[in-house]
Image: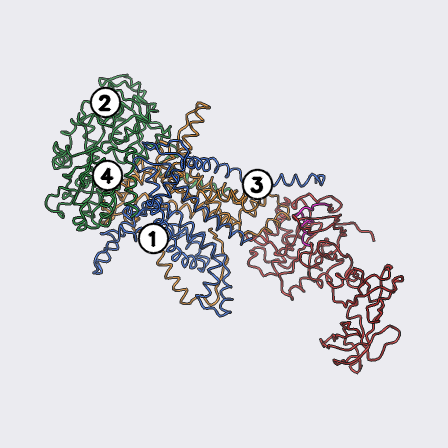
Amino acid sequence: MIDFSVSNRTVGGERHTVGRRVLGAHAWLTYIFLYAPIVVLVLFSFTKDSFGVRWTGFTFDWYVRLFNDTRMMRAAGNTLWVALVTTIVATVMGTLMAIAMERYRFRGRGGLDALLYLPIVIPEIVMALALLAFFSFSFGIIESITGVTLRMNIWTVIMSHVAFCISFVVVVVRASLKGFDMRLEEAAADLGADPRTIFWRVTLPLIMPGVIGGALLAFTLSLDDFIISFFTVGPGTNLLPVEVYGRVKRAVTPAINAISTLMLVLSMLLIFLSQFVQRRANR
Amino acid sequence: MKGIYRGLLALLVFGLLAACGATPAAEEAPASNEATGETSTNDGVDRSKLSKELYVYNWTDYIDPTILDDFEAEYGVKVILDNYDANEDMIAKVRAGGSGYDIAAPSDYAVETMWREGLLQEIDQSLLPNLKHIEPSLLNKYFDEGNKYSVPYMYGITGIAYNKSIITGTPDSWSLIMDAASASQYKGQFSVLDDEREVPGAALRYLGYSLNETSPEAMQKVQELLIAQKEFVAAYNSSDVNRKLASGEYVMAQAWSGQAMQARNGLGDEFAGNPDIAFFIPKEGGMIWMDNMVILKDSPNAYTAHVFINYLSRPEVAAKNTDYIGYLTPNKDAIELLDPTVRALYAEGFAPDAEVVKRLEWAVRNETTAVFSDVWTAVKGE
Amino acid sequence: MTTLAPDELPIAQRNAARRRLQLLLAPGLGWLVVFFVIPLIIVLLYSFAAPGPTGQVIWTFSFDNYVTLFGKDLYFNAYTRSLVIGLQTTVLCLLIGYPLALHVVLADPKWRTVLLFLVLIPFWTNFLVRTYAWMLILSNNGIINGLLELLGFAKQLLYPSEGAVLVGLVYGNLPFMVLPLYASLSRFDFTLLEAGSDLGGNGWWRFWHIMFPLTLPGIVAGSVLVFIPTVGQFVVSDLLGGAKVDMLGNLLQRLFTRSNPPNWPLGSALALVFMFFLTFIVILYFRNTTEDER
Amino acid sequence: MITTSAVVLQQVTKRFQQVIAVDTLDLDIRDGEFFSLLGPSGCGKTTTLRMIAGFEFPTTGSIYLGGEHVERIPAHQRNVNTVFQSYALFPHMTVAENVAFGLEMKKVSKTDIKNRVGEALRMVQLGDYGHRRPKQLSGGQQQRVALARALVNRPKVLLLDEPLGALDLKLRKEMQIELKRLQQEVGITFIYVTHDQEEALTMSDRIAVMSSGKLLQVGSPTEIYERPNCRFVADFIGEANFVTGTMIDGASTHCAVDVGNGIILKGLHQEPIANGTAVTIAVRPEKLRLSVSPPDGSSYYPATVEQVVYIGSDTRLTVTLVGGITLDVWEQNSRSTLDRDAYWQRGEQGYVSWNPDNALVLVK
């Protein structure tokens, strides 16, 4: 879905018309709409007002308090870890599956197609409870066979997150494979590249925008998931969305705004760096 | 080049994690308690039988975190706390098995659900000498006669909290929020709980029924009443009623006593209280409920769990906890240790007196009350 | 070079292709089967079971849950209501997202990626916290009312309301609309518009007869991606709608974990009917578009 | 002259489900020759090329490259290279990286790669374009890059799949000459797929004409043009007049065909044809003569001028014989302007004649 490499284009006669100005104004308004809550959120992480609803002066107190809040910091760390591992695993598997779906005709492909859309349309709460039942069921079987008692932990969350992220990656990567010129792979084979080399040197670089798009989507989904995380996490592993959900129920304090601001900054750094490195690698 | 890319990404994330001081997996084991040479002290606790960790599953913000530190300091047991926001969420996880928790805090009816399903361990009362501090009238309740499985932790009542500076006089009836004339006057300025048992329950009492009435006629009347009320309600809200009452966004609300107390007194350093907030149980009657400490069936640390529950039942600990949470303590000997302002509020109606107790009712929640779901869905779907 | 006897070869070839296919599919498919299909089968079994007196699942086999679902107006109302809100959200997202995607596609290539990221960045913050930020903006003492007062107007009750729910839903789902639209528009050949103007079509005609049909796959993909989470969510309607607007997600959440006792079998049936309905639509759409492309 | 074979196809058939794309094809392409596969679209020429490249494997039959069995060897293990119709340049690599790709795959040393890439780019006159991206080049330049990318590997055989199809006419002409020059310079066997007969005639040493998956004729451009072995080839390459009739004297090479209305046409054929066989006589328009008075020595037929089109170098006439047979006659305007035969008016009478050696009698 995300195709970052669009060729330059000029639209003859459309450049500076009224239409373009209206589009520009619309875009500005939409960006204001998108950023209004973000600005409020960031701003109010510095307010002195403990209700977090009024601007009563600038302070770093909430950040100091946040850094001393080991529970919250650990939750943030766990959440980032889950999101990262999920993103990597789901992106690799999803990309491979997307290639299989686009390049091969095989029996059961139609069914698999349907299966891949199910994790997208399934309501989160249903998937969460289904996974809870599944883990309890399979742990029971494992215990009765091997005598080993398993418990949910951070890895059960990761497994669950991967399960719903794969589909999103597949959808995005397939879109980028649809516009792929198969002749390029033939040309590489013709020049003596074996299938593996073709994949790494030609196919992957060319679908990279789609792969990155899928990875970003997986990262966002995992980072923000609350319900599935709640039901599949084990004792003592705190996750940020769960922690935040619990805390805002009582009161949204500027400390919550502060952790959100921090996560925003970290995520942006991550994206910026990945883009930077990718551009470097392309050069 | 791919490798560099991945390596850098991983490095960045690890860097961030390190900066956050977080470890990806669950927390490490706390300092060992083996150093404690004495196997028992005069408090009767056999320290050699204590585990290093205790996993407690509790409602969000339902315990003073310093109590956990105090407990660890005294016994060397690290308490690992996770939170839930509904009995049903907690039961779902416990029922699935292997939840890994030792202690949970189900509400009254949920205690019954859990022990009937075999999810709980019987409590060894000999390990709980502090049970003697619990108010006798709050023991042996319908959901756990003889307190074989549960120890009262906190209780509360459901009534109306209001802002005295706006609602003058002394309101004493559910009609304040149920009667169209009154509700329309405060349109968009009050909330009722987002709870399929509490709201129809209040309506039932207002209509002169028991909280546990399930006859079709009564349900029909309740549904009509609540649908009529809906357009005036600002929100169905069970969560931040405290803050919204304190900040003046709501002038009144159906609320749990603890929420009302927090609106009046403020909540830690998170927000300031509003001295104009008052609370009452309407003359038609209200709901009483209680959260209880239980030990889960598959808890490997039952002994430590008993010690922890007994610790929470110490009057001074219960008092500290109650000051923090704002709900009502069933610990009769803790009351005199409470913060004087809290005690004053108890006297003002935030806690039931002998007169109020008579019109409080426990809410049954079992298959017969499934009809409340339909009423609520109908109201919500309107 | 090694050569094989010709008659053996097609089989060897086929086997190699099959091995490669297996290698590509196995990890993802295996994962999905274990962590998605099996759990889903459990849900399917639930939907034929009966609710226990305290919210357990009692294993029987009956269609009672489906009968209840289609028999009571109650659930039908909740269904249609959340479908209406879902549609409203989708249409609004489309009306806002299409011009935005167009703007990004037409922008200077240097800025295109930046503009696209600007759409995504707000979503790196916690959804709940973002929704709370909207409460701060829309509340009685909030920013908009503050501005109104400053300008001498009367305060408006902006939240909680259905309008606020729509604002929150559109806000929360806009990128899911913009991204597919962007992908679709970036493949669109803008010289076709010039051809259209050669033929004498005006702006609207050109949009409606050239651009719209050619970017339809993006429009439909975006609509599906917006519609599904909208109908299934429950946080926005709880927070910005004062829990007065019941979406399918709210209903499911209640049936599964808020009712006393919960009714997992009925919830499972409700969810499955919903999923079946949506998957049907999605597959129908994607099958048509893939055939068009080939 | 003894030459070795670069590529040999024996009884090659390729079937895609129900469709037979290539039908029992036999080809023998010599070392160092410029060989064209010519035919209308869908005739199987591209499939043949793809089988030689290794992108498709034949359903049955054998392919030899330099004497070795290769029909089951995948493309990347064959020492042939392809220039694609759409060029198929890697958009994410620079021109130099594109050209270096094949050498890298062969693990050629870095300095060698650098030298050979530079050399190859100079050869296609793109010496200064190495750092550019393919998208920044014109169509003709991209075409040259594709050529350099293939040639740099010094393949035994270079396969070209309609490589000039996307270029405009002027550039095409230039590139045709350029390609021929290059081929002679590097001495590599070129197999060139095209549907443009003029292109094939201009560049090729030999041409194979294909139709519906079958090979019709192989030969030098002159052979193909002057001695087509069937009506399809005669029609596809150049223009021809076709007259159908019945063989009445098929024993000698110079035979007679009855085309009806009492007209007997003389023609040439290689092998005896039984009398009574339905045949077609093909005569190129430029081989016909139209004169005011009956010419001496050869057979002639009275004709009426129906149409006159003057195109400078030629005058193209359409005439009708008695009985309605229509023929195209191209008169070269090389004669004196005083020559009466050079100026024809519509409706005038004249006499059509030709050398029977130029009238081919075709059975197919």
State left or right for residue C118 relative to residue B133. Answer: right
Q: Picture coordinates of residue D227 (x, y %)?
A: 80, 62
Q: Which amino acid does label 4 sit on?
A: Glu
How far apart in space, not on screen, are marks 4 and 3 (Cα)? Answer: 57 Å
Q: Are marks 4 and 3 in contact (CB under 8 Å)?
A: no
How far apart in space, not on screen, are marks 4 and 1 (Cα)? Answer: 38 Å
Q: Kindly identify which numbered label has been placed on residue D227.
A: none
Evaluate whether residue B31 shows in this view: no
Residue drawn at (15%, 26%) of the image: B333
Q: Colour of chain A?
A: orange
Q: Mark 2 points at which residue?
A: B146
Q: Do the residues labelled 1 and 2 touch (CB within 8 Å)?
A: no
Q: Which of marks 1 and 2 is in front?
A: 2
Residue range highlighted in magenta: D45-60
Q: Hey, which residue is sitting farthest front in the picture? A: B217
Q: What residue type is labelled 1?
A: Tyr
Whether residue D237 is situated above or below residue B13 in the rendered picture? below
Q: Colour of chain C?
A: blue
How far apart in space, not on screen, are marks 3 and 1 (Cα)? Answer: 44 Å
Q: Kindly identify which numbered label has been placed on residue C21.
A: 3
Q: Hey, which residue is sitting farthest bottom in the picture? A: D338
How far apart in space, not on screen, are marks 4 and 2 (Cα)? Answer: 27 Å
Q: Colour of chain D?
A: red
| Residue C44 falls within the magenta-colored stretch | no
